[in-house]
Amino acid sequence: MSWHYQQQGSGRPLVLLHGIGMSHSAWRPVMPILAKHRQVIAFDLPGFGRSMILPNGTVPNAHNIIKSLGLKLKAMGIDEPVDFAGNSLGGYLALEAAKQGLARSVVALSPAGLWKKEAAAHVTPMFNIMRGAIKTFPRMSYALMRLPPTRALLMAVPVSSQAWRMSAKDAVVAAKNFAHCKAFDETKEAVSPFVGGHDLKIPLTIAFGTRDWLLTPSNQHADELPKHTRWLNPKGWGHVPMWDNPNAVAQLILEGTK
């Protein structure tokens, strides 16, 4: 399949994976900071942004997505394990990359899949309401996203209570991506609890912000992770913290993948 990506900087590769309904543009606030130190490659996941869906009806579960990504990295001339940073769905996939031996280290920001049986009950209805509203009332939705107060209100749970820090352009792009991505439902349905990480030897960092109101503490379990996992709860960070504090997020990623 065709993986779309944006690349900046030079040095040891650092792969960035976004959350569900988003695209590589979610990393826009931190990429210039990371690119001062690393070759940063931010991918659009299959069926999101400008990447095609997985071919031939392949189920977009973690195993299949990471297997396809591994082939893409090899085609780019990257054969060795690489460092991963992922947010939400991207954090879940980064952990899968560790299981498949593709990751040298992982920093997962609010990763999905660290729940016992399924995500909190509010997650799916909230996603459905938001996607439906944007599709039904696109002009009004984009107009509201351009205003800092309503942007902060509408995106408090899925992104951050500090969404007013986003530029109007970034907010509108995020809304369009969320509403019109091709593989949202199939990918969401393919997310299952992360298991089998006890024997991982690579450096792992997990960070759930204190203002993550999407994946609340009931979704934050370390049972399937190795004992050496570094677990953090950064104060004031929301579910998608890249706009909350770009410098601190970039520093955490650089520390966790050094």
Image (cartoon, grey):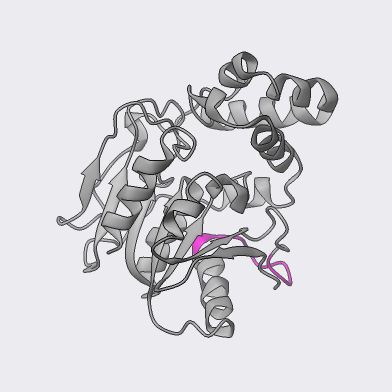
The verdict on residue 212 being magenta is: no
Residue situated in front as seen by the camera: 211 or 13? 13
Image coordinates for residue 219, horizontal then vertical, percent: 36, 36
Q: Decide whether the magenta segment is chiefly helix, strand or loop.
A: loop
Q: Residue at x 58, y 48 (%)?
A: 189
83 relative to 200 in the view: left or right: right
Image coordinates for residue 102, horizontal then vertical, percent: 40, 74
193 relative to 170 in the view: left or right: left
Classify 38 as above or below 137. Answer: below
Q: Is residue 257 visible?
A: yes
Image quarter (top left, top right, bottom left or bottom right) of the C terminus = bottom left
Q: Residue at x 44, y 32 (%)?
A: 244
Residue situated in front as seen by the camera: 97 or 50? 50
Q: Residue at x 26, y 55 (%)?
A: 255
Residue situated in front as seen by the camera: 238 or 29? 29
Residue situated in front as seen by the camera: 189 or 179? 179
Classify 254 as above or below 99. Answer: above
Image coordinates for residue 204, horizontal then vertical, percent: 27, 58
Image quarter (top left, top right, bottom left or bottom right) of the N terminus = bottom right
The verdict on residue 59 being magenta is: yes
Q: Which residues are magenta?
A: 54-62
